[in-house]
Amino acid sequence: MISEKIKELEATKAKIASLEKSIASELHAELRALPAKFGYDSAAAFVQAVKAAAGGRGKKRRGKSGGGKRKRATITDQTRSEVKKMTEAGKTGSNIAAALKISLPSVQNIKKALGLVKARK
């Protein structure tokens, strides 16, 4: 009884493997035929057209904005003085960062360097 079930299981596994191989072969053939189906001479030209239609050059998008690598903010003496003024005016770090278009950690670093934050105990 058990041996029959084992034989049936092995036969089913063989059938699944055969089906997977058949599907992979058909899929490969369909993918190979796509460029010609859409009127392209080569796969490279087809890929280029697909990338152009997708609106990009195929590069990965980063972050929520979808842009590439962020540009580092340049912290000048003027930026430091603005941070100091805004801190003394009671603005939060988030408000300062948004107004000066710098990151919150940059604001915190400037405040620390200027001695505007209390030391932690």
Image: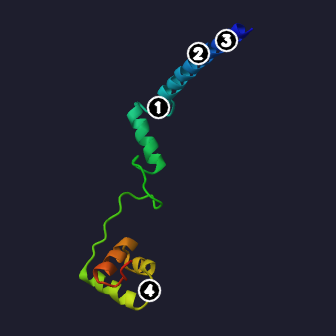
Crowdedness near tag 3: few (<14), some (14–19) or many (≥20) residues, C-alpha within 10 Å: few
Q: Which mark is residue 35?
A: 1
Residue 10 at what x, y percent from top left? 63, 12
Q: Toward the viewer: 52 or 105? A: 105
**Three-letter code for the amino acid on which mark 3 is drawn:** Ile
State the separation of the CA atoms marked 3 and 4: 73 Å
Comparing 75 with 22, the one in front is: 75
Marks 3 and 1, how far apart at CA: 45 Å
Q: For marks 3 and 4, give the one nearer the viewer.
A: 3
Compare marks 4 and 2 and give the one earlier in the sequence.
Answer: 2
For label 3, the SS is helix
Whichever of labels 3 and 4 marks the residue nearer the N terminus, that label is 3
Q: Position of residue 70 (x, y in %)?
A: 35, 62
Front-most of 3 and 28? Answer: 3
State how far apart marks 2 and 3 are (Cα): 18 Å
Distance Cα–Cα, label 1 vs label 2: 28 Å
Q: Residue furthest bottom?
A: 89
Residue at x-position 47% and y-position 26%:
32
The residue wearing badge 4 is 91
Query: What residue sits right under mark 3 in the picture?
Result: 6
Against 8, residue 71 (above or below) is below
Q: Which residue is mark 2?
A: 18
Residue located 75% across and 8% down the image: 1
Q: Earlier in the sequence, mark 4 or mark 1?
A: 1
